[in-house]
Amino acid sequence: MTLAQFSPEEIEAARKVFAGEVQFLMGVVKLEQLPDAFETEVAFAGRSNVGKSSLLNALTGRKDIARTSNTPGRTRELNYFLVTDDLAIVDMPGYGYAKAGKQLIAGWQKLIVEYLVGRPGLRRVFVLIDARHGLKNTDFPTLDMLDKAAVSYQIVLTKADKLKSDEREKVLASTIAQIAKRPAAHPIVHLTSSIKSTGIAELRAEICQLAAG
């Protein structure tokens, strides 16, 4: 399996869903602050310089739904965005954590694990990987954590516009091979570019499919 395939009707339906007023709901730093469970939640995780904010902005068709920064690792809480009354996107702290102290990092990690194992509406975690580098050693602890927690996750390769066509094919094939035996990994990998809008429509459709299922 390679890239996700969706019909034109599914692509258009997802576009309409995300064309609505996507709102920032709240930032969560403690488990007790979590809002009531939504029917569907999808979370986004990735290294602190992977382009997560840019991808979320591209998904929602906005320039500032998730603030981009020249200083990676600025997301230090679980940020909730409402797409519809029943669908929420959760922007998770970037791992790598920039220059945060050990105590703060430990607090984030505890919050993330408790969120992952205790959220009934969490359908999938999208793990963002820079397509220029592919999966790195710093990514594997997060994948291991998701496998251990039995939380479904799917790899999203970002910044595909930075690669030539043959390079994209190589990193895609390599990524698929690396996750093939991981128990909680979805076998289909998304290849995206926030700048060129590559794969953005398909990722929207994937999220809407999860919400419908």
Image: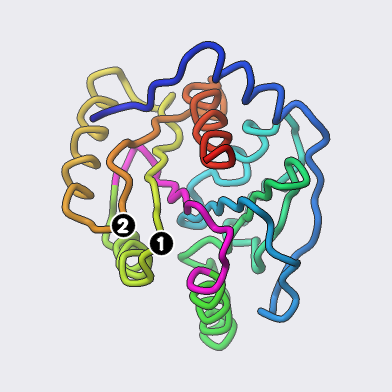
Which residue is depicted at the point 58% across and 41% down? 211
Q: Residues within 10 Å of mark 1 (few under 14, many from 20)?
A: some
Q: Is residue 104 left or right of residue 30?
A: left
Q: Quadrant of residue 144?
A: bottom left
Residue type marked 1: Val
Q: Is residue 19 left or right of residue 49?
A: right
Location of the N terminus (image quadrant): top left
The residue beneath circle 2 is 184
Q: Nearer the viewer, residue 156 or 1?
A: 1
Say which element carries label 1.
loop
Say which element carries label 2.
loop
Q: Nearer the viewer, residue 110 or 40?
A: 40
Which residue is depicted at the point 59% across and 82% down? 104
Which residue is depicted at the point 75% across and 65% down? 27
Is residue 124 within the magenta segment? Answer: yes
The numbered mark, 2 or 1, whose residue comes first in the sequence reads 1
Residue type marked 2: Ala
Which residue is depicted at the point 47% across and 14% down? 7
From this viewpoint, which residue is outermost toward the bottom? 103
> Which range of residues does the magenta coloring cover?
116-134
Cα gap from disc 2 to disc 1, whole angstroms: 6 Å
Q: Which mark is residue 28?
A: none
Q: Is residue 137 left or right of residue 19?
A: left
Q: Position of residue 12 (x, y in %)?
A: 62, 16
Number of dots carrying numbers: 2
Q: Position of residue 34 (x, y in %)?
A: 71, 71
The residue beneath circle 1 is 151
Q: Position of residue 71 (x, y in %)?
A: 62, 56
Label pair 2/1, CB-CB below 8 angstroms = yes
Q: Position of residue 67 (x, y in %)?
A: 72, 48
From this viewpoint, which residue is outermost toward the top? 8
State whether residue 59 is above or below residue 143: above
